[in-house]
Amino acid sequence: MNEVVIETYDLCKTYKDTEAVSHVNMTIYKGDIYGFIGRNGSGKSTTLKMITGIIFPSKGDIKLFGESRNKFSSRRIGSLIENAGLYPNLSAYDNMEIKAIAMGIKDKKMIEELLTLVHLNSKSKKAVNKFSLGMKQRLGIAMALLGNPDLLILDEPINGLDPEGIREIREVIQYLNKTKKMTIIISSHILGELSKVATRYGIIRDGQMIEEISAKELDEKCRAYLSLKVDDVTRAIPILENELFITDYAVHENNEIWVYDEIESAKVNETLSNHNISISQMFYQKKDLESYFLEKIGGSDNV
């Protein structure tokens, strides 16, 4: 059984009369790359801030690696939420060194290794205020990795980056997960990019967790299929199985059959018609990831 890294129970956060997060139950397993998805203002950042200890819940409990959040050592968590709090007039190395000193880390070799990991030159004297947005994001990730955390939390790490910057961040995330076996939470509204790395997803809407789903389960739900609506499902199924050798299908309400096996619609139409089975509708359908998420969260605004 997979080790549970994060569990939240009935997690709530209220600001005056507004409930930003409402009764969120979240489970994240060791080795997950967990894509946390929701529209702007849905409660993503607030939830992550409670997990990292930046803010406290109004109600509920958080367990990290089986321990209560109140008893847990924050050294096992690295995070980049909103911004990294960089010193703009200092170099990447100097920013890293200041944080390392604050954390009681004396290993300067670690600083050099982390900067190399995120493709930044540890010897460069270039001030951070001269960095591109992508360089600042990569430096923020390097700072989050000081102390070799077991869990990395990234809030919108690729927001505003160009394609090259996005690719670099993606490669770092994949390296950390596969090589370091690091569990990673990524909050992002760039769904196409998130789908390239995430192994599980949590979908939040109006402060409530509406679904947790694995990438495998999501792929299954988004498979292409041929939708048939027939007048007699009981008669149609044996014909599809025995004459067209269809094995991968699902029967839905209102006499609808979804056929996942690859087959020409004309062949299906001809075969069923020969048995006097009427088809009232037939079309190919494939739901992409973005359509699935937008259907869940409601609307087409940024997520």
Image (cartoon, helix red, strand yellow):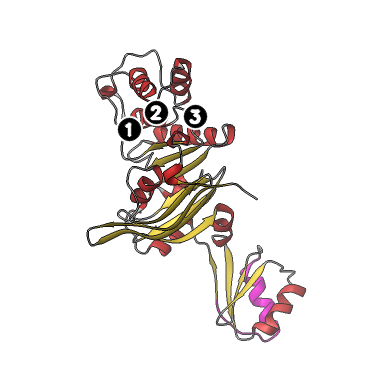
Residue farthest to the left? 16
Q: Position of residue 73 (x, y in %)?
A: 45, 37
Residue ID for mark 1:
84
Magenta residue check for 280:
yes
Which amino acid, mark 3? Asn
Looking at the image, residue 270 lies above or below residue 98 = below
Q: Is residue 68 above or below residue 240?
A: above
Front residue (pair 285, 296): 296
Residue type of the residue flagged with mark 1: Ala
| Amino acid under disc 2 | Met
| Residue beneath disc 3 | 148
Q: Give the image location of residue 215, x and y in percent.
A: 55, 52
Q: Is residue 234 visible?
A: yes
Q: Which residues are magenta?
A: 263-281
Label 2 neighbour load within 10 Å: few <14, some 14-19, many 20+: many
Q: Are marks 1 and 2 in contact (CB under 8 Å)?
A: yes
